[in-house]
Image (cartoon, rainbow, N blue to C red):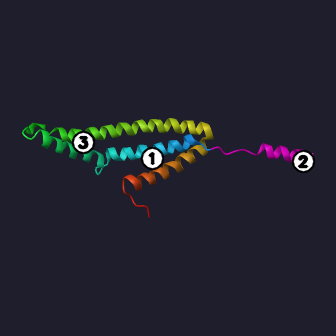
Amino acid sequence: LEVAAATILESKFQFEMPINKRAIISGALGATASSIGKLALSPESPVPSTFHSYCHIIMNTYYQHENDIGWICPYVSLGTRVVCFLCMIGVNLLMVSSFLDGMNESGSVVGTALSTAANFSFSALYGILFFEEHVP
């Protein structure tokens, strides 16, 4: 009887820990969205300034004699910020969908913990690779 009870308890409390990919993906998407938002809204962002510089180069090369075209370059810079901002919103929508699927897959506590850990990790990675931030 003791052996049967021990076997039942072992089988009852023995479970596998699957890898919850959707919760991890949601954390990575959250970090990606925040990085895109930083590109869209930061005054030191390289994306709008690069497009603004290219616009001036193109305007000076092809439209040397027309002074009325100089108003286009600030709008090009603004347009790149708007595109980055819309991409951030789209990636955030994907992140929320993936997060909810991850919570259904693994439960709310495990899903939230995995998503948060992945978000921190990918945010640090993006900061080091793309924004030249230093980790002490």
Choose the circle earlier in sequence order: 2 or 1.
2
Helix or strand or loop: what does disc 1 sit on?
Answer: helix
Is 91 on the left or on the right of 109, as rendered?
left
Q: In which quadrant of the rendered view does residue 36 lie?
A: top left
Q: Position of residue 136 (x, y in %)?
A: 44, 64
11 within the magenta span: yes
- Magenta stretch containing residue 34, yes or no? no
**The N terminus lies in quadrant:** top right
The amino acid pointed to by label 3 is Ser
- Left or right of 35, for residue 2: right
Kind of residue at disc 2 = Val
Q: Nearer the viewer, residue 104 or 76?
A: 76
Disc 2 is placed on an element classified as helix
**Which residue is denoted by mark 1 in the rendering?**
31
Mark 3, residue position: 77
The outermost residue toward the front is 61
**Dot label at residue 3:** 2
Residue drawn at 85 percent across, 45 percent down: 7
Q: Main secondary structure of the magenta part?
A: helix
Q: Residue at x 27, y 45 (%)?
A: 48
- Real-space CA distance between mark 2 and mark 1, rounded to the nearest whole angstrom: 51 Å
Q: Which residues are magenta?
A: 1-18
Residue 60 in picture, x, y percent from top left = 13, 43
Badge 1: few (under 14), some or many (20 or more) residues near its Cα, within 10 Å? many
Residue 90 location, quadrant: top left
